[in-house]
Amino acid sequence: MRPWDLGPLWVPAGYITGELGPVYRWPGMADLADMLPTMIPKHLGATVIPQCGHWTGEECPDEVNDFLLGVLAAL
């Protein structure tokens, strides 16, 4: 993976997380959503689900499905 270290992600991608998830709560990770458009040229959106933990698909299936349908529509 070394040739791609710190390079942009060239495939279309979206980002979803729960605000209570441990990964999102690590220092600096809350700012990741703001940085994604520069890291992913084909960025399709980001969402942080309020009051949701790490298992977003199980905890908030309607919100996850809405986000995924929006990403797929953008393709």
Image (cartoon, rainbow, N blue to C red):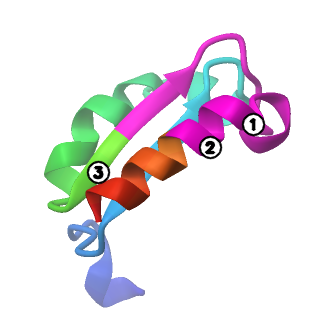
Residue 20 versus residue 60 in the image, above or below:
above
Residue 27, percent from left and from top: 51, 24
Q: Single out the residue that lies furthest toward the top.
A: 51
**What are the residue bounds of the magenta stretch?**
46-66
Q: Residue at x 70, y 18 (%)?
A: 20
Q: CA distance from mark 3 to mark 1?
A: 19 Å
Q: Nearer the viewer, residue 23 or 18?
A: 18
Of labels 3 and 2, the one closer to you: 2
Contact, CB < 8 Å: mark 2 with mark 1? Answer: yes
Quarter occupied by the C terminus:
bottom left
Q: Earlier in the sequence, mark 3 or mark 2?
A: 3
**Residue type for callout 2:** Asn
Q: Look at the image and tell me whether residue 5 can be seen.
A: yes
- Residue 48 belongs to magenta span: yes
- Helix, strand or loop at disc 3? strand
Residue 6, percent from left and from top: 27, 66
Residue 41 versus residue 29 in the image, above or below:
below
Category of crowding for the residue at label 3, using alpha-carbon neighbours closer than 10 angstroms: few (below 14), some (14–19), many (at least 20): some
Residue for badge 2: 65
**Residue type for callout 3:** Leu
